[in-house]
Amino acid sequence: MPHTKELVEKLVDTYGRSRESMLPILQDIQRTEHYVSDDAMVEIAKQLDISTADVYGKATFYSFIDTVPRGKYVIRVCKTIVCEMHNKSGIIETLENLLKIKIGETTLNRKFSLLYTNCLGWCHMGPAMLINDEVFTDLTPERVREIIAIYKNKN
Amino acid sequence: MSDRLKRVDVILGNYHPEKYKILAGAMERPNKDIIQDLIDSGLKGRGGAGFLTGLKWKFAAQVPSEEKYVICNADEGEPGTFKDREILTKVPRKVLSGMGICAKVIGAKKGYIYLRGEYKFLVAQLNDQIDEFHTYCDKLGLDFRVEIFLGSGAYVCGEETALLNSIEGKRGEPRNKPPFPTNEGLFGKPTVVNNVETLVSAMMVCKIGPDQFKKLGIQDSHGSKLFSVSGDTPRAGIYDLEFGLSLEEFVKEFGDGDTKAVQVGGASGFCVPRKKFSQTTIGYKAGLDGDNLPTGGSMMLFNSSRSMYHVLENYLEFFEEESCGQCTPCRIGCQQLKKGIDAVKRGIRPPEYLDQLLKLTETMKITAKCGLGQSVANSFSSIVENFREEMIY
Ligand SMILES: Cc1cc2nc3c(=O)[nH]c(=O)nc-3n(C[C@H](O)[C@H](O)[C@H](O)COP(=O)(O)O)c2cc1C
Ligand code: SF4
Ligand code: FES
């Protein structure tokens, strides 16, 4: 994919041609392409002069780097204890119904993915979730419906 | 609030009206005096392990090297902890001052804030603060630059050596210690890794002096401490309280009248049942800390409607997912513990099997490489021993 190659080249120019640039590069690819493809990993390895296995090992280590395609908006709902205690399951149920997907899945139009994550650091205002980088707290099924309605209207 | 539980507002209190005044003052003082003040203040790390901050700085200062680093650990991944975000949001200048003072004392030219990916929304405002900080560094003749390094959703990267590997572009897996980061840290160079709150406390010691600082807190726990309070409480939030208070007082203040247990120190910490509230104090003397135990001020309250079995199951799932998998006792141990309590609950295994699982956590404590695997025993044993019936029926 020529596009991926260009993107990686650009990122290597930005962050520098060294191993330390790997995580920032992976993060940027994740942001623009919504996952890090095999092609992208091969290209990063080539550009940074390290093995592909090394890049793969790094990419799969971090839960916010995906190696399978995800939707444009990745919803990560906290499933750690405090949010769990405050009706996390009601939030998940609402999201599954609204998006017509199960946890771990992506909508057919590639717009939304629904995932679990661990403690987001908003326990006092749980249940909490992230949509890409944006945080949503004090969730109720009603609030989730409002939020998703807004995102459905976004490009 | 009751007297003993007074809010001291040391950490989150207002800024000095003159920007970076404390840093400017520190620039005029000999390094050894600042280190001595920190040691005298008794300040211990707020990230969990509780190492004396003054000693840490002293070790890094002693090693001759052209290249040294100061790292602010803002990975804040321990369940039930959310105070570092509050500090970085409300008083980022205090954190940067602390980093600047550390850089001056140890002779570092470069610093990183390792910010968890979940807090990415803070990057823009922090970068503005960093830019301003750099102009003050230049004015004060401090050759020091700070950069944000963003994590990507891995709890173990909060462990200081895993954090270093992560910045170096390796998998974020903990290293063997020794060597300690103060000798061989980032890129093999002397490095101080401090928690966000520790850096602010160090700056406070410079501001008010070790004697004043020591007056806060009780017994061996000096200074104030931010507590992240959550769970079954009508008053969830972040509180700047004196270290060393008893759990009974804490529950009186924060409980919902029906508190059955308090988890102190997050999933890696200890679960204290109601009958032990009066004999437990929160602080370093309380036996609630040990090496590598992240007691970062997380306090989660559970009332009697909660199943402690589900609580433990939730923790074990967390550990199983967050284990870096590097060493067998932790990788396999976490899985086996989770399967084990499930088997007992469903009657597939007899209740005595819990004792075998307890032994397994003891083995993990001794053989696991880092604090993650080592501290699983804390919550496991304190829940299984105090709530055994709930594990079985
Ligand atoms: C699994 C694990 C996760 C940790 N996470 C954090 C963290 O998020 N923030 C932090 O400051 N310390 C964390 N620590 C403790 C650090 O390893 C280190 O002790 C601390 O950053 C030192 O700073 P301090 O002396 O100022 O506390 C963690 C330790 C372990 C074992
Ligand atoms: S104890 Fe667990 S998290 Fe720590 S190094 Fe071993 S496998 Fe990794
Ligand atoms: S438990 Fe959900 S944000 Fe901490």
Image (spheres, rainbow, N blue to C red):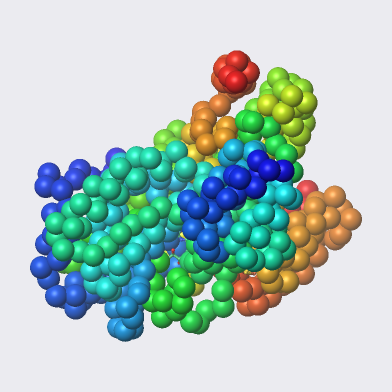
Residue at 63 percent across and 56 percent down: it is A44
Q: How many marks?
A: 0
Q: Nearer the viewer, residue A50 or B273?
A: A50
Residue B235 position by quadrant: top left
Of B305 and B268, which appears nearest the observer?
B268
Q: Is residue B332 visible?
A: yes
At 23% across and 69% down in the image, what residue appears? B104
- To which quarter of the image does residue A155 belong? top right
In the image shown, does A138 or B131 lie closer to the viewer? B131
**Placement of the N terminus of chain B among the 4 image quadrants:** top left
Viewed as shown, does residue B28 lie left or right of B291?
left
Residue B133 placement, left or right of B247: left
Q: Residue at x 68, y 69 (%)?
A: B326
Vertical placement of B50 versus B242: above or below? below
**Residue lying at 20% horizontally and 58% vertically, measured from the top left:** B137
Q: Position of residue A80 (x, y in %)?
A: 61, 44
Q: Position of residue B49 (x, y in %)?
A: 45, 67
Q: Position of residue A134 (x, y in %)?
A: 51, 33
State whether residue B306 appears in this view. Answer: no
- As drawn, A72 above or below B17: above
Question: Where B194 falls versus B230 (above or below)?
Answer: below
- Is A75 positioned to the left or the right of B50 in the image? right
Q: Residue furthest right?
A: B348
Q: Position of residue B276 (x, y in %)?
A: 50, 57
Image quadrant, ligand 2: bottom right
Left or right of B311 on screen, residue A106: right
Image quarter of residue B340? bottom right
